[in-house]
Amino acid sequence: MAGRYPKVADTSNVTQFPGTEQKDTLSEDDIFKTTKDHMPSRLAKDERVVWRRLVPELIRENRFKPLYVDFLKEYCVVVARMERFLEYLDDPSVGWKYITEGRNGTQEKNRSEAGQYNDDWRKWNSLVNQLGLSPATDQKFHSLQPDLFGQDPYSG
């Protein structure tokens, strides 16, 4: 048959894809209260800034679970550490490299802080992938592909 599909008048028998249903929206006061109530007590000031930036967005996306507080704490620690390293290394009087002279002549070497920053970047990248905080990994949380065999009896 050529042409357009006929318009469907009755949509009551249409099954909605999982994850696309309307969710109850929380008020900003509830989001603030949840963010504050679940904040770990031993976060430093700059780590709390990251927590307050991240957790409300996860709550709005309905992806925050109190079970993952320790995991989110580690994310905040790593991000705050990376920001401190960047602030230090981007200072023109410090820089990412230093020059040394020895029997092999003048050599330019990376600062140890640059190596620590690179290590923290790898940790951050792993945490981002596990939390679904990048555009590519976010898709697994918003997948419109239904399960082929129905509900998994072993999940949550």
Image (tube, grey):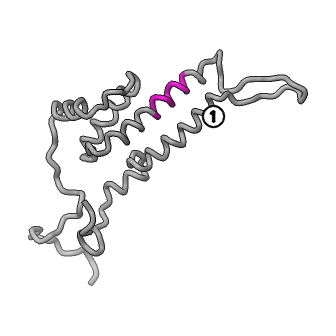
Dominant secondary-structure state across the stretch colored magenta = helix
Picture quarter with the C terminus: bottom left
Nearer to us in this view, 105 or 10: 105
The residue drawn where x is 37% and y is 55% is 139
Relative to the observer, which residue lies in front, 94 or 22?
94
Whole-percent x, y for residue 153 in the image: 24, 69
Type of amino acid under label 1: Gly
Q: Nearer the viewer, residue 41 or 155?
A: 41
Determine the residue positioned at 57% across, 21% down. Answer: 88
Mark 1, secondary structure of its residue = helix
Query: Residue placed farthest to the front in the image?
Result: 42
> Whole-percent x and y of residue 76?
40, 34
Residue drawn at point x = 23 percent, y = 64 percent: 17
- Residue tagged 1: 115
Extent of the magenta region: 78-87
Seen in the picture, residue 3 relative to 67 is either above or below; the reply is below
Residue 71 position by quadrant: top left
Q: Quadrant of the N terminus?
A: bottom left
The 10 Å Cα crowd at callout 1, few under 14, some 14 to 19, many 20 or more, is few
- Determine whether 140 is above or below 152 in the image: above
Q: Is residue 2 left or right of residue 81?
A: left
Judge whether residue 65 is colored magenta: no
User: Is 68 situated left or right of 119 in this image?
Assistant: left
